[in-house]
Every structure is written in structure tokens, then in C-alpha cells.
Image (tube, grey):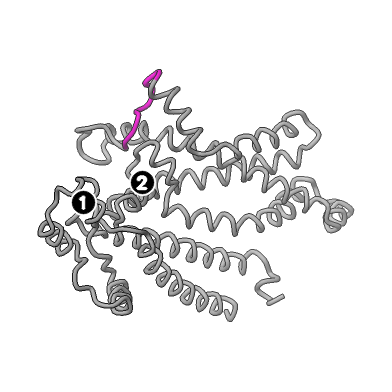
């Protein structure tokens, strides 16, 4: 219990640090939305129009930087992220509410599939090492994992969207698809998600395969496995009870971080496919110098990673007696 309380206190402190950095970093980006708009229209906006835009965006009379910081913290505690500057006057909370389900559905599901698929293949590759198939897996996995997401995404777009039109080129749903969660809606959603999902699974599973294979190879060299075999335990029991459990533990932290980063989405993948998730909106917010939307998404990413790691720490207490006993 003391271990979890310490971790929870560290979580709160780190969240405060993340919120403070989240306030500072966007303000280091040069320019503001009104300046970008005036540059876009090459001075066609009058000073009066610029002042009106600043008033609409809430950029006038904000006080000192310290006052802005405390105002930001107060709004943060109330769950008020302000209004998006790039999609004015839509509140940031509405933008996130629209985008988050698409990112969590796509990136979250594919991250979990990648982890379990890669870990299962890595376990097989290590356990059956010496066979042709098992020995061929690591170099293939290294090649797939080294491919940049965006390059593989563009390749899939060219092959299956531009040349053959098997899958849609972009977006998340067909126009006028009708009511949500109907069979037609599900079919359209799955067709649009197929290429982004394939991009993530293929490129990410290779990394999990290599990680799990290395973990299993390390565990298989331990003395307690020789002792287990000397006791007459079957290979299946040794694999499930000793090798799998101990090999999975080092991967849990990485998996927790991967789940935390689901909130941010795979920015390049969502941008290539124009998939309206949080990663796509984060890129749009950076381009448009949209402080409120940038701050909200950055903070959500940081909070998700920290919370996911706290959950992993809690799982360690259950799975590893050494942590529970304070060793």
C-alpha cells in the first residue's frame, strides 16, 4: 500500500509539472493566430479587423504571464480548456469529444492487437528457435519495425486506394452514411479504418516481437528453469508458468506507455489518411498556433501516459511479489 501511495503522490506531482510545461511550451511557438491570418492574407486585414479578431480569440488584456498561469490552472481544475482558435467558436472540449473516440478506437485497438500479436510471435520465435520459421521471424520483424509509419502508410494508399480503389483514400466515414452504429455505418467505418490499422499493426508488431523474443531468451537461461525440468515439470507448464509470466513483466512498462500515447494518436498516420483523430487535430493546432487546443491535447497525452504507468505499477504489485514485499 505504501508503494502505491508513493506512486500516486508522484503521479500528482508529475501532473502538475506537466500542466506547467504545457502552459509554457505553446507560448514559445512564434506568432499567434491573428498574425498567421494577417500573413496569409498579406496585410489585407485592417488593424481594426486584427483587434476584433484578437478580442474574439481572447488574446486581449490577458494580464501578466503569471496571471495567465493562475487563470489557466483555475480553468484546468474546472475542466475548461477554452475555445479553439482554429475552429472558433467551438469549445476545445467539443473538439476533443469528437476526435477522441476515433483515436481511441483506432490507435487503442491496434496497439493492443500489435502487443499481443507481436508478443505471441516473439514467444514462438524464442521457444522454437532453430526451426526455419522461428529463425526467419526476427529479421522480418526488424525490417517491418524499422519502416517509418508514414512511408508504409503512403505505400498502402498508393496500392489500395489510388490504384485499385479497394479502400477509401481518406476520412473516417462515407458521406451520408446514415445513423450511427447501423450495419451500413459499421461497414463504412471499418473500410476507412482498415489501412490506418494495417499500417500500425504491421510496423508496431515487429518491435513487440523482438522485445518478447529477447525477454524469453533471457528467461530461458535462468537456473530455476533447469531446476523445474529436474523436478519433472512438463514443457508446457514451464512455458506458461515460468517463462511467459517472467518474460511479460519487462514489456508491461513499455505497453503502458504505448497505451498512454494512444490519446495523442499516431500523428503521421492520421495525417496521411486525414483520419479525424486527436493526432490529426494536434497537427492542425500546431500549424494554426491554436494554444487552447494544443494545451488540451498535450495535457491529455501526458496525463494518459502517467495514469497508464501508474496502472502498470499497480499490476506489478499483483504480478511480482518482490515489489509487493518491497524488495
Residue tagged by mark 2?
Answer: 280
Left or right: where does residue 227 sit relative to residue 56?
right
Is 285 on the left or on the right of 155, as rendered?
left
Q: Is residue 169 magenta?
A: yes
Q: Give the residues in magenta.
A: 163-171
From the viewer's perspective, tell me whether residue 18 is left or right of residue 227.
Answer: left
Of the residues tagged 1 and 2, which is closer to the observer? 1
- Between marks 1 and 2, how big is the CA–CA gap? 24 Å
Q: Which mark identifies residue 81?
A: none
Residue at x 67% of width, y 44% of height: 210
Q: Is residue 243 magenta?
A: no
Q: Where does residue 1 sit, x and y in percent of width and height?
A: 57, 79
Q: In the rendering, at what x and y percent does residue 47 appear?
A: 13, 58
Q: Residue at x 72, y 51 (%)?
A: 215
Give the percent coordinates (x, y) of residue 218.
78, 52
**Lower position in the chain sequence, tag 1 or tag 2:** 1
The quadrant where residue 19 appears: bottom left
Amino acid at each position: 500500500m505504501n508503494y502505491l501511495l508513493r506512486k500516486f503522490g508522484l503521479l500528482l506531482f508529475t501532473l502538475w509539472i506537466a500542466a506547467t510545461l504545457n502552459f509554457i511550451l505553446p507560448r514559445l511557438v512564434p506568432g499567434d493566430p491573428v498574425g498567421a491570418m494577417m500573413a496569409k492574407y498579406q496585410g489585407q486585414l485592417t488593424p481594426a479587423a486584427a483587434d476584433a479578431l484578437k478580442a474574439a480569440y481572447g488574446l486581449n488584456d490577458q494580464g501578466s504571464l503569471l496571471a495567465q498561469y493562475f487563470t489557466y490552472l483555475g480553468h484546468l481544475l474546472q475542466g475548461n480548456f477554452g475555445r479553439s482558435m482554429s475552429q472558433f467558436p467551438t469549445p476545445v472540449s467539443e473538439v476533443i469529444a469528437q476526435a477522441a473516440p476515433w483515436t481511441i478506437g483506432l490507435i487503442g485497438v491496434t496497439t493492443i492487437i500489435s502487443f499481443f500479436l507481436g508478443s505471441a510471435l516473439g514467444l514462438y520465435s524464442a521457444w522454437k528457435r532453430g526451426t526455419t520459421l522461428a529463425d526467419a521471424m526476427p529479421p522480418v520483424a526488424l525490417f517491418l519495425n524499422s519502416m517509418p509509419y508514414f512511408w508504409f502508410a503512403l505505400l498502402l494508399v498508393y496500392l489500395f486506394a489510388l490504384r485499385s480503389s479497394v479502400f477509401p483514400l481518406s476520412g473516417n466515414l462515407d458521406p451520408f452514411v446514415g445513423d450511427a452504429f447501423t450495419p451500413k455505418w459499421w461497414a463504412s467505418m471499418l473500410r476507412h479504418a482498415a489501412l490506418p490499422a494495417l499500417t500500425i499493426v504491421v510496423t508496431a508488431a515487429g518491435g513487440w516481437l523482438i522485445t518478447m523474443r529477447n525477454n524469453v531468451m533471457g528467461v530461458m537461461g535462468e537456473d530455476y528453469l533447469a531446476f523445474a525440468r529436474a523436478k519433472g515439470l512438463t514443457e508446457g507448464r514451464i512455458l506458461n508458468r515460468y517463462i511467459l509470466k517472467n518474460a511479460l513483466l519487462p514489456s508491461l512498462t513499455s505497453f503502458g506507455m504505448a497505451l498512454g500515447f494512444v490519446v495523442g494518436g499516431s500523428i503521421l498516420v492520421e495525417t496521411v489518411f486525414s483520419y479525424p483523430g486527436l493526432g490529426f487535430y494536434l497537427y492542425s493546432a500546431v500549424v494554426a498556433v491554436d494554444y487552447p487546443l494544443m494545451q488540451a491535447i498535450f495535457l491529455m497525452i501526458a496525463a494518459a501516459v502517467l495514469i497508464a504507468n501508474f496502472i502498470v505499477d499497480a499490476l506489478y504489485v499483483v504480478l511480482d511479489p518482490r515489489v509487493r514485499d518491497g524488495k
